[in-house]
Image: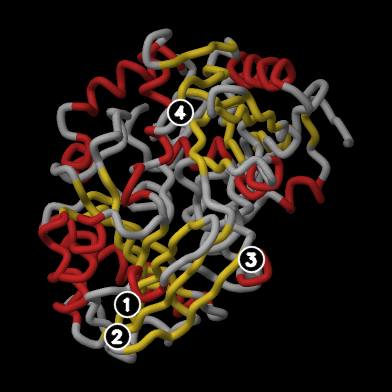
């Protein structure tokens, strides 16, 4: 690493900076003034102290999988957590993982233990620190909720460079601020994450529905019965069909007829069986070329709006490319275990996430779709939904006040406490 004037651990090498000037979304480019790649938590603390002393903006980068430039900064420093990747299996159903650890790496470390995190995201390359700062969901969220509800304790480096352990009973305000806090209150350097027992094999079904109402009834039925271990759905607007992806973990024999009994699908597209229970359902790196643009938005919707959202009257099929060059997904989510106050979601014991993601090779078309998705937000929020802050939402002060409600002032107070120099200044965030 070439260091020029910023002190140990921080480089202004042009190649290092260029490599961290874009993110997965591909819609935003920002050139940092310098790049920090700390080798351990002590170096993280030192770099944060220097940034606070010099009042330098600090963007935190894990796998660079942000959608709207959250891991980028113009002229500030990018702190890349790539070396904070240690993972350790603990007793008592926990795994201890540093913030830069990728979820796919955690699955690899747990191979052969018959254990997995209760909630896994679908992309192996995203990091622990990033998803816990946003929320984190997956195909087991219908049973366990969000990742932020499955953490026992955290180690955090605050905006003053202080290294703090926090949990629901120790330094609880910091614990509540950083889970779902969009990286605006501190850097998650380590997490103690709950595990679950898994089956030896996974049987995965892809079920095609052309009757949207029948799908909704079946979806509600299998969730109420807790019939499947993995569950998500994809709507295909060009073909007017919905695909339910449902998986069952098992040890010995498995009865297909019993698993699918009473469901009104039109046909089974595929049935797959694998012993790779952890990586099953995770998207492969090569599916996402960095040469493409990915306009992407996510929303959390009240369960009672399911049929309205399935009809998607606001979505013109000419806006998005045909599947598989687009993904319009639905994940059912249990809300009772979500206890992070800055993670905003609809009321009720159950909700679902609604995603629109496109893979485009023309920036102009991607930019146009991003504008359409912003317009759709008003309609979905009007139905009682909340934006998932995994991507740039383009909110102004009024929209942020509506999003956070009475919790906004609490968050502003936490910002003053944990990041008094405001070095974690996420673009567009309302806490500063």
Crowd band around label 3 with a 10 angstrom C-alpha radius: few (<14), some (14–19), many (20+): few
Number of marks: 4
The alpha-carbon separation of the residues under discs 2 and 3 comes to 24 Å
Q: Is 297 situated above or below 335?
A: below
Judged from this view, the residue extending furthest toward the front is 253
Image x and y of residue 45, in percent: 66, 16
Image x and y of residue 222, in percent: 25, 62
Image x and y of residue 375, in percent: 24, 66
Q: In which quarter of the image is the C terminus?
A: top left
Counting residues from the N terminus, which is met first, the one under dot 2 or under dot 4? 4
Crowd band around label 1 with a 10 angstrom C-alpha radius: few (<14), some (14–19), many (20+): many
Q: Can residue 7 be seen in this view?
A: yes
Tell me what residue is drawn at x 57 percent, y 80 percent: 361
Callouts 2 and 1 close, C-beta under 8 Å:
yes
Callouts 4 and 1 close, C-beta under 8 Å:
no
Tell me what residue is drawn at x 57 percent, y 18 percent: 157
Q: In which quarter of the image is the N terminus?
A: top right
Q: Mark 3 points at which residue?
A: 284
Counting residues from the N terminus, which is met first, the one under dot 3 or under dot 1? 1
Callouts 2 and 3 close, C-beta under 8 Å:
no
Q: Name the residue under label 4.
A: 151
Q: Position of 148 compared to 340: left or right?
A: right
Q: Mark 1 points at which residue?
A: 235
* Element marked by disc 4: strand
Q: Give residue 241's mark.
A: 2
Tell me what residue is drawn at x 35 percent, y 17 percent: 414
Callouts 4 and 3 close, C-beta under 8 Å:
no
């Amino acid at each position: 690493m070439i260091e020029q004037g910023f002190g140990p651990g921080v480089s202004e090498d042009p190649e290092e900076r260029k490599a961290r000037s874009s993110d997965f979304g591909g819609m935003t480019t920002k050139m940092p003034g310098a790049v920090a790649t700390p080798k351990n938590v002590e170096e993280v603390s030192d770099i944060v102290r220097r940034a606070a002393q010099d009042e330098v903006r600090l963007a935190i980068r894990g796998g660079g999988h942000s959608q709207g430039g959250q891991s980028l900064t113009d002229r500030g420093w990018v702190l890349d957590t790539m070396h904070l990747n240690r993972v350790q299996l603990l007793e008592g159903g926990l795994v201890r993982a540093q913030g830069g650890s990728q979820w796919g790496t955690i699955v690899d470390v747990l191979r052969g233990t018959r254990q997995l995190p209760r909630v896994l995201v679908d992309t192996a390359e995203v990091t622990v620190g990033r998803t816990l700062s946003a929320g984190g969901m997956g195909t087991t969220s219908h049973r366990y909720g969000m990742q932020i509800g499955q953490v026992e304790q955290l180690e955090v480096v605050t905006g003053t460079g202080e290294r703090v352990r926090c949990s629901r009973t120790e330094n609880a305000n910091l614990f509540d601020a950083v889970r779902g806090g969009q990286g605006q209150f501190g850097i998650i350097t380590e997490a103690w994450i709950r595990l679950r027992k898994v089956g030896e094999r996974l049987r995965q079904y892809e079920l095609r529905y052309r009757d949207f109402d029948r799908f909704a009834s079946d979806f509600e039925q299998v969730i109420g019965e807790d019939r499947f271990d993995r569950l998500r759905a994809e709507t295909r607007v060009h073909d007017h069909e919905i695909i339910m992806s449902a998986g069952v973990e098992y040890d010995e024999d498995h009865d297909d007829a019993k698993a699918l009994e009473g469901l009104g699908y039109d046909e089974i597209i595929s049935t797959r069986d694998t012993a790779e229970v952890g990586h099953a359902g995770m998207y492969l790196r090569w599916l996402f070329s960095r040469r493409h643009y990915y306009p992407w938005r996510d929303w959390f919707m009240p369960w009672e709006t399911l049929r309205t959202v399935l009809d998607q009257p606001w979505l013109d099929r000419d806006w998005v490319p045909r599947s598989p060059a687009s993904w319009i997904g639905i994940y059912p989510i249990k809300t009772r275990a979500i206890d992070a106050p800055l993670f905003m979601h609809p009321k009720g014991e159950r909700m679902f996430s609604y995603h629109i993601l496109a893979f485009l090779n023309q920036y102009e078309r991607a930019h146009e779709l991003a504008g359409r998705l912003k317009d759709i937000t008003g309609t979905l929020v009007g139905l009682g939904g909340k934006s998932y802050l995994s991507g740039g939402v383009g909110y102004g002060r009024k929209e942020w006040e509506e999003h956070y409600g009475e919790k906004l002032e609490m968050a502003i107070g936490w910002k003053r406490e944990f990041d008094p120099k405001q070095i974690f200044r996420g673009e567009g965030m309302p806490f500063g």
